[in-house]
């Protein structure tokens, strides 16, 4: 189970990218994070595995506060967090197999890692996963010989070979054509179900989010303004997420409603967590 508690990121430029986001992701939920450009989606995802260092708040993975870990402890903890990137982050001159096996680097000694010397079980695991992602028999191809969709499958295989307890995907479809985007979303959701792990996908395309996600997190200006089942993502909720002025209007509506006895539904649609203020 992943829990973020009042997670906040202020860049050294003074930009507050994430403003106290609290949420929980568990089971094999497919969670899509949507919001306008600059809302803080990538920053939130990257704060979870501390690729970006959070300024305040906690990230708890299966009860362990990742923000409290020393660098070497965090390196070990990252084995549990598979990450899929928009631009794949493959080593172009290496083969498909070498790229996938790099997902096991956190499990072998520094010496073995340096020599890229992996135990046979890791190689077997990598072959299995290449089959799952539809790249059987392509293990010896160089990454730079692959299409975008194939590269992303290698990126997914590399994340899955880690045997993570959660997957994070930062705009995994943004560089892909529509067919490849659907294929990647289908693959990610199938993996979450098969491995019984949750996945958070930062995604620009709302229709893709609606088609594949169980739950939506909506960010606007660093604030979590929507956290609910995909079926609840109606026009009002989209306005709240994508149009800043709607937040104020909806908050006013909620205040009025709560004075007259309000509904749980309204509270779920508009959730503006308080900042720690420190
Ligand atoms: N390294 C950085 N240094 C300073 N400010 C940054 C940095 N990275 C992001 N920001 C700022 O933080 C805010 C959130 O950016 P972020 O990339 O997290 O948003 P996003 O929702 O993922 O946007 P997009 O959908 O366009 O990728 C923006 O105002 C951005 O300019």
Image (tube, rainbow, N blue to C red):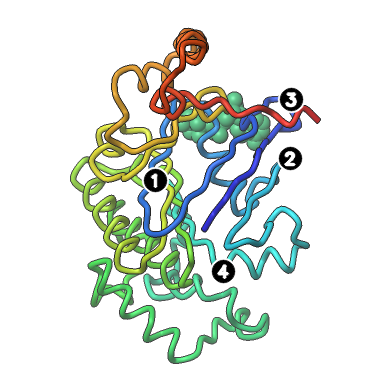
Position of residue 13 in the picture relative to residue 246 (left or right): right
x and y percentages locating residue 245 in the rendered image:
48, 8
27 left or right of 248?
left
Element type where label 2 sits in the image: strand
Question: At 39% from the left edge and 75% from the top edge, which residue is drawn?
Answer: 97
Crowding at label 4, few (<14), some or many (≥20) Cα neighbours within 10 Å?
Answer: many
Quadrant for residue 130, please give it. Answer: bottom left
Q: Which residue is mark 4?
A: 79
Q: Are marks 4 and 2 in contact (CB under 8 Å)?
A: no
Q: Earlier in the sequence, mark 1 or mark 3?
A: 3
Mark-to-mark CA distance, 2 and 1:
23 Å
The CA distance from mark 3 to mark 2 is: 14 Å
For the residues bearing labels 1 and 4, Cβ distance under 8 angstroms: no
Q: Which residue is mark 2?
A: 56
In the displayed structure, 1 sits above or below 243; it is below
* Label 3 Cα neighbours within 10 Å, binned few <14 / some 14-19 / many ≥20: few
- Which of the marked residues, 1 or 4, is nearer the chain's N terminus? 1
Residue positioned most to the right: 278
Q: Earlier in the sequence, mark 3 or mark 2?
A: 3
Could you say whether the residue bearing mark 1 is in a helix, strand or loop? strand
The disc, 2 or 1, on the residue closer to the chain's N-terminal end is 1
**Which of the two marks, 1 or 4, is nearer to us in this view?**
1
State whether label 3 is within 8 Å of ligand 1.
Answer: no
As drawn, the label of residue 31 is 1
> Do the residues under discs 2 and 1 have CB atoms within 8 angstroms?
no
């Amino acid at each position: 189970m992943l829990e973020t508690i009042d997670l906040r990121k202020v860049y050294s430029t003074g930009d507050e990218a994430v403003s106290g986001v609290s949420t929980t992701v568990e089971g094999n939920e497919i969670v899509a994070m949507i919001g306008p450009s600059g809302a803080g989606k990538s920053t939130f995802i990257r704060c979870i595995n501390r690729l970006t260092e959070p300024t305040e708040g906690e990230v708890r993975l299966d009860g362990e506060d990742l923000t409290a870990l020393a660098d070497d402890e965090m390196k070990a903890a990252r084995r549990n967090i598979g990450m899929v990137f928009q631009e794949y982050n493959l080593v172009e001159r290496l083969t498909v197999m070498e790229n996938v096996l790099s997902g096991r680097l956190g499990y072998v000694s520094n010496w073995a890692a340096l020599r890229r010397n992996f135990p046979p079980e890791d190689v077997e695991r990598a072959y299995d996963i290449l089959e799952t992602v539809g790249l059987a028999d392509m293990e010896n191809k160089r990454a730079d010989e692959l299409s975008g969709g194939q590269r992303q499958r290698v990126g997914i295989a590399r994340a899955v070979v880690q045997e993570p307890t959660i997957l994070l995907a930062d705009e995994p479809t943004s560089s892909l054509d529509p067919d490849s985007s659907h294929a990647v979303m289908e693959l990610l959701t199938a993996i979450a179900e098969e491995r019984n792990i949750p996945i958070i996908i930062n995604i620009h395309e709302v229709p893709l989010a609606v088609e594949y996600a169980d739950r939506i997190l909506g960010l606007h200006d660093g604030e979590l303004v929507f956290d609910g089942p995909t079926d609840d993502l109606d026009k009002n909720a989209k306005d709240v997420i994508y149009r800043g002025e709607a937040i104020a209007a909806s908050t006013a509506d909620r205040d009025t409603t709560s004075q007259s006895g309000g509904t749980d539904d309204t509270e779920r649609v508009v959730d503006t967590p308080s900042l720690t203020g420190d």
